[in-house]
Amino acid sequence: MRIYLSRPDITEKEVEAVCAVLRSPNLSLGPKLTEFERDFANYIGRKRAVGVNSGTSGLFLCMLALGIGPGDEVITTPFTFIASATSIMMAGAKPVFVDIDPVSLNINPAKIESQITPNTKAILPVEVFGNPAGIDKVCEIAQKHNLLVIEDSCEALSSELDGKKVGTFGTMSVFAFYPNKQITTGEGGMILTDDDRLADMCVSLRNQGRGKSGGWLDHERLGYNFRISDINCALGIVQLSRIDEIQAKRKQVAKWYQEILADDERLIIPTEPDGFDVNWFVFVVRLADGFTQKQRNIILKQMKNEGIQVSNYFSPVHLQPFMAEKFGYSEGDFPIAESVAGRTIALPFYNNLSIDKVEIVCRTLKEILDKNLPSP
């Protein structure tokens, strides 16, 4: 590939921090874990943060800490990464999907209440691609019906809605640090809450069920090895300290795309509405209404043939084969999510993507569109 879809932004500061841990005797459950959790909680503005080895683990532990299990239902979106739904299933509960808003691509709050049943325990909204639209309305519905909110903020670090940071809306929230995220620890995640009881439970569950005062071989409950190492945390501490720089870089790349592609009626370009501060996770354009998944797939293939790495983002969760088989979903169940998913094109997007490469991506995309798609 000439231009990759994503690349991490690692400086010598991160390298030095990781090497310092490697030279120390504390590779896990050491001072860097405590420091990263403290720094992250302070940055988001919540009382407690619990580091784990992935966002998926974090979502799963939220389910367990909140007592969600067999017989319970959790409302979520079918337009997301698979872990939003499988974390519910891992706890033995059932994901109940609600179609998305066609503009924000987040779960549509107006459609949630019709899906609430006596078995509904929680709502798991996702700030898709970093966009927090609708999270406030989801929380209002949850409060009205006495439901928990598990905020999947894995794609939205440092985004804000009306000055309120993503990750502060839910009963609990989760962030993720895979290499294509806003900051990375290689692999890793973070659980946020203001409830000490929930945080303490997650600390125990991530560490084989050990208690606060027990020894290494004393286990108070069924737990898991979901720990994040001090090596990962050292990387995360430096990355988080650079978050303003990182956000500025990502906003600039997004602005270049928005300016260059704005006049192409064949594309729908993501924008940042008034009152929003969006720190984009990925930059996903989509073909305009009326175009098809088959046409989109041709665009993806030809872009890759030109050495530009692009992708669809996302595939509908409910149509994943094991989901459809288990719950009986089929095409047409969530038409907006399906229509959007069939037209998405994730463009190369990362901190240090240059204007020259953005121009190459846009020029190549327009040439391929001219070759394959008539104007609507």
Image: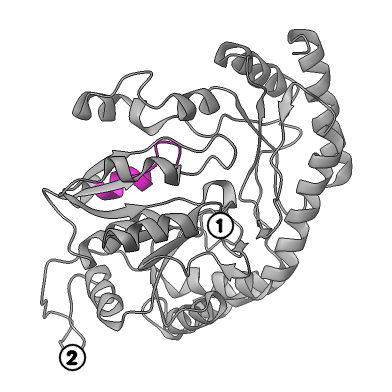
Residue drawn at point x = 57 percent, y = 70 percent: 164
Query: Which class describes the residues within 10 Å of circle 2: few (<14), some (14-19), or many (20+)?
Result: few
Determine which residue is flagged by label 2: 213
Residue drawn at point x = 27 percent, y = 62 percent: 61
Which badge, 2 or 1, comes first in the chain's sequence? 1
Secondary structure under tag 2 reads loop
Say which quarter of the image contains residue 139: bottom left
Tell me: 366 left or right of 337.
right
Secondary structure under tag 1 reads loop
Determine which residue is flagged by label 1: 156
Q: What stretch is highlighted in magenta?
A: 76-88
Q: Nearer the viewer, residue 332 or 136?
A: 136
Residue drawn at point x = 65 percent, y = 51 percent: 280
Query: Which class describes the residues within 10 Å of circle 1: few (<14), some (14-19), or many (20+)?
Result: many
Image coordinates of residue 269 in percent, x first then y, are 72, 36
Residue 82 position (above or below residue 195): above
Image coordinates of residue 267 in percent, x first then y, are 73, 26
